[in-house]
Image: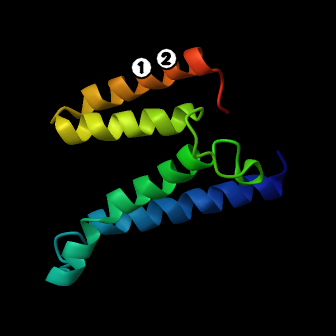
Amino acid sequence: MSREEALIIAGMAAVTFLIRYSFFAVGERLVFPPLVKRALRYVPVAVLSAIVAPAVLLPDGVAGGWRLDWRNAYLIAAIATAVLAWRGDRLLLAIGGGLAVFFAWRGLVGWSG
């Protein structure tokens, strides 16, 4: 690794640390309006959706195109996980069930990636 690359990585680490630490340092003195507090409650769901949706719907990447068929093990497992999470209140069971469906479907139908 060159010196320039090391400086870039150190700079990115410092910026990331300072941004995250700033909320701990001034957390009690910083008061958000109710509208902002309500909007921030949806951030985790939005971020998780932005990460999961492309992986489920485009398992081969953008070049591979949309995979909205029954052979897509990612899609079948995501649907099973959503149903398990919706019908029950045990998140770990839903995740484990989704993983089991994914590996079983991949074994029965073939690799979807």
Identity of the residue drawn at 58% across and 41% down:
69
Image position of 103 (left or right of 1): left
Q: In this image, 47 relative to 7: left or right?
A: left
Q: On screen, 6 above or below 43? A: above
**Looking at the image, which is closer to me, 113 or 12?**
113
Badge 1: few (under 14), some or many (20 or more) residues near its Cα, within 10 Å?
Answer: some
Find residue 49 and name its label: none
Going by the numbered disc 1, the residue's amino acid type is Ala
Q: Amino acid at mark 2?
A: Ala
Which quadrant holds residue 55? top right
Q: Which residue is tagged 1?
A: 100
Q: Secondary structure at mark 2?
A: helix
* Mark 2 vs 1: CB contact within 8 A: yes
Q: Name the residue at 34% across, 30% down.
A: 95
User: Is disc 1 placed on a helix, strand or loop?
Assistant: helix
Which residue, given by chain and number where applicable, does mark 2 sit on?
Answer: 104
Q: What coloring was used for the rendering?
A: rainbow
Left or right, 39 with respect to 18, comes to left
The alpha-carbon separation of the residues under discs 2 and 1 comes to: 6 Å
Q: Residues within 10 Å of mark 2 (few under 14, many from 20)?
A: some
Give the percent coordinates (x, y) of residue 60: 70, 42
